């Protein structure tokens, strides 16, 4: 049973925002936020209104069923409508429960994604590049803006590390499920005996923190500049353009040397550092609030093995929900990535719902 007062609050909030946005008197700084909230409420408003009207409709139909002066045909039709109404009520309740579930405060933020080659040497770096290409395709299909922040290349076209930002609507709510260890099983090109090797890469997805989210004091930063170096130790710049920033209280260190401009490297490094410090603070609060946070879907635990990509069998398996898709090529091309993401979201919603009812 969903408290009727909470449902009425949804309707009141939707009406108030509709009136405010149509008046043209909204603070420009708050317009985007209020528009997004109005749009979100718009997805549930009809259900909320139907749920509020349910009791009145039920009362009218019951009166018709119980009125012996009515023809049997009218009573049968009223009974059928009553049965249909009760079925609709179940759906209304489920939809409203999911809508009213506690939401991650960072779900509507942009994200910074960090992919690093793990165990497996060269093969791990090639897999790191494959994962990056997969996320590129997912972003392209969703019309999200992807911007590379830093790439550290290895041999044969692989990546030791790649860091990029993704901008759009509700980015973090989608990509947060990618945090963890991704494992690949395939025959490397250099393997002469046809043996399957296992390699891994780690993915960390951070909510992109704005200055209003966390205060980074200038006095808490140590900024070092140095000459950027390329593969093999050669210099890629004749000036001290590379930047290393250390956040002294947390010990978080970020180095950036992709740009020729020291100013641009510093701006990129600060962007990553702010998000890493914000995430560290968030994890600390989450742990204090809930000791079982780490076991939940979408917890962002980057040490957890979350997915295996098996090339010989053409399958991808997500171990958190025991879901296997025998469409590996389509998954890596971003075609059916949404299918797995929806299952992960559903699992997390059910966990939250069970916790709510416990």
Image: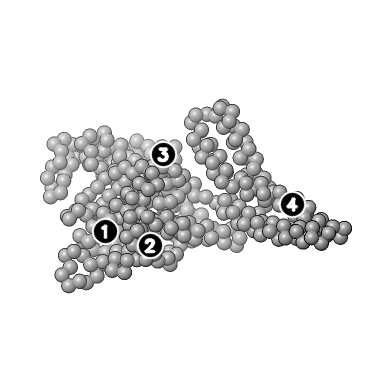
Calculate the distance from the C-alpha at mark 4 to the C-alpha at mark 2. Answer: 47 Å
Q: Are marks 3 and 4 in contact (CB under 8 Å)?
A: no
Which element type, helix, strand or loop, lies under badge 3? loop
Which element type, helix, strand or loop, lies under badge 2? strand
Q: Which residue is mark 2?
A: 306
Q: Nearer the viewer, residue 217 or 82?
A: 82
Q: Nearer the viewer, residue 213 or 156?
A: 156
Q: Position of residue 245 (x, y in %)?
A: 28, 41
Vertical placement of residue 247 versus 319, above or below: above
Left-right relation of 197 to 99: left
Q: Which quarter of the image is occupied by the C terminus? A: bottom right
Of callouts 3 and 4, which one flags the residue occurring earlier in the amino acid sequence?
A: 4
The nearer-to-camera label among 1 and 2 is 1
- For residue 127, the mark is 1
Residue pictured at 17% horizontal, 68% vertical? 191
Which element type, helix, strand or loop, lies under badge 4? helix
Q: Quadrant of residue 183?
A: bottom left
Calculate the distance from the C-alpha at mark 3 to the C-alpha at mark 4. Answer: 48 Å
The nearer-to-camera label among 4 and 2 is 4
């Amino acid at each position: 049973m969903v408290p009727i007062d909470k449902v009425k609050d949804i309707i009141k909030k939707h009406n108030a925002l509709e009136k405010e946005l149509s008046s043209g008197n909204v603070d420009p700084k708050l317009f985007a936020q209020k528009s997004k909230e109005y749009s979100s409420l718009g997805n549930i408003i009809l259900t909320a209104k139907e749920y509020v009207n349910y009791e009145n409709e039920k009362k009218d139909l019951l009166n018709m069923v119980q009125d012996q002066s009515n023809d049997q045909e009218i009573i049968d039709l009223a009974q059928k409508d009553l049965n249909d109404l009760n079925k609709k009520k179940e759906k209304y309740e489920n939809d409203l429960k999911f809508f009213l579930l506690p939401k991650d405060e960072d779900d509507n933020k942009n994200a910074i994604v960090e992919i690093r080659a793990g165990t497996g040497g060269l093969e791990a770096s090639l897999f790191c590049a494959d994962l990056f290409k997969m996320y590129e395709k997912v972003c392209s299909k969703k019309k999200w803006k992807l911007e590379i922040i830093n790439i550290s290349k290895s041999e044969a076209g692989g990546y030791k590390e790649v860091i990029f930002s993704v901008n759009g609507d509700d980015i973090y709510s989608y990509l947060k499920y990618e945090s963890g260890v991704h494992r690949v099983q395939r025959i490397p090109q250099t393997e002469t005996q046809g043996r399957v090797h296992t390699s891994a890469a780690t993915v960390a997805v951070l909510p992109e923190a704005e200055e209003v989210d966390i205060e980074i004091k200038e006095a808490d930063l140590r900024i070092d500049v140095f000459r950027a170096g390329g593969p093999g130790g050669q210099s890629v710049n004749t000036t001290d353009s590379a930047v290393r920033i250390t956040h002294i209280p947390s010990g978080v260190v970020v180095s950036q040397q992709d740009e020729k401009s020291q100013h641009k490297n510093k701006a990129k490094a600060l962007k990553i550092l702010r998000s890493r410090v914000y995430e560290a603070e968030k994890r600390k609060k989450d742990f204090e609030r809930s000791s079982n946070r780490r076991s939940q879907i979408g917890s962002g635990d980057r040490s957890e093995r979350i997915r295996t990509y098996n090339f010989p069998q053409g399958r991808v398996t997500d171990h958190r929900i025991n879901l296997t898709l025998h469409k590996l090529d389509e998954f890596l091309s971003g075609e059916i990535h949404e299918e797995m993401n929806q299952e992960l979201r559903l699992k997390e919603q059910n966990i939250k719902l069970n916790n709510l009812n416990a």
